[in-house]
Amino acid sequence: MDYKNLGTTGLKVSELCLGAMMFGDRTDEQDSRKILQKFTDVGGTFIDTADVYGAGASEEVLGRWLKTQQRSDYVIATKVWGRVGPRPTDQGLSRKHILDAIDASLRRLGTDYVDLYQLHLWDDSVPLAESLSTLDGLVRAGKVRYIGVSNFRGWQLQKAVDLCAQNGWEPLSSLQPLYTLLDRSPEWELLPVCRNEGLGVITWSPLRSGWLSGAFRRGMTAPPTDSKVTTPGTHSWDRYANEHTWHVIDELTAVAAETGRTLPQVAVRWLMQRPGVTAPIIGPRTPEYLDDLLGAAEFSLAPEHQERLDVASRPESVPYPYFFD
């Protein structure tokens, strides 16, 4: 496992980040611990969760495991925004909710601080300055070491960066976007902002909820019955079951065969070699699936294979004004 700086910060993180979203939900505690041990045994240090994953169970499982470890060995990231209770103030990015949420996350994680605290989504109902100044206070209080955001749009990200600079607040260190072979729109604005402003990039869902796992093939008329794609969402069948997706999967399958690697390994490796990407987040449901995904750190794609995947996955049409590039 290699290590990279998170953007222009001095924080070193492993080139793969372990996503703990399944812990305590689709993955029981015993298998969650096996996954954590396997990941850390090969040098993984970067672990991502959120307060809403498993209604807090993910942080609790991770926290119980963390108590058996040397805390300083790991970079623990969590997020705030989602609904965690019935009260009107139990959601969003208000100062009250952020302050309540960080204390609750710290209790569940069993730690005095979070290495990376991220705004999970944009909140239209709260002034951005209120949210960012609150994060700055958490850094000053020692509860948080670095701050980031997830799922922001380009203008939102740039506004956040600028507000921090203008007010002397703790600067953003990272962005956590959806970025895969099937989702390359971050290249239009988000990645350039990250590059220009020195932010690290931690990509989520590198296999797009199974679309790039090998379980989906040209000619299918419905998703596998055990797939997350059977449920409505941004990864739905109607959104991705099209010629562009089948073409990407065809090329991914060919590259995997030529390199002697699995489709998940090649899809994750493509991301690891994209400019500006710090660490894809891998979120295996089982220890066995983690073994496969960790193979992405064991090889490099040749330039010709990387280029073939780049070409195959480029959007067929680019909206205004990006087609001027």
Image (tube, grey):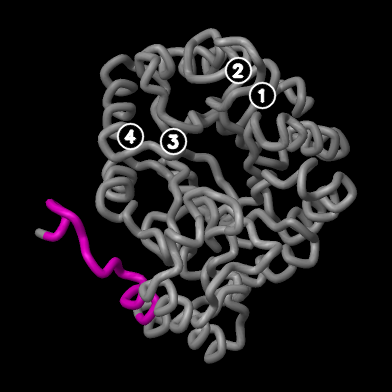
- The local secondary structure at tag 3 comes to strand
Q: Which of marks 4 and 1 is in front?
A: 4
Residue 130 circle label: none
Residue count near mark 3 (Cα–Cα under 10 Å), binned few <14, some 14–19, many ≥20: many
| Tag 2 residue | 142
Q: Do the residues labelled 1 and 2 touch (CB within 8 Å)?
A: yes
Q: Quadrant of residue 277?
A: bottom left
Q: How many labels does the image show?
A: 4
| Tag 4 residue | 157
Q: In this view, does 128 lie to the left or right of 176?
A: left
Q: What is the distance, in whole Å, between disc 3 and disc 1 at their CAs? A: 16 Å
Residue drawn at 54 percent across, 77 percent down: 220
What range is drawn magenta here? 308-323
Relative vertical location of residue 298 with respect to residue 115 in this rendering, above or below: below
| Tag 3 residue | 173
Residue type pointed to by label 1: Tyr
Q: Are marks 3 and 2 in contact (CB under 8 Å)?
A: no
Q: What is the distance, in whole Å, between disc 3 and disc 2 at their CAs? A: 16 Å
Residue 113 circle label: 1
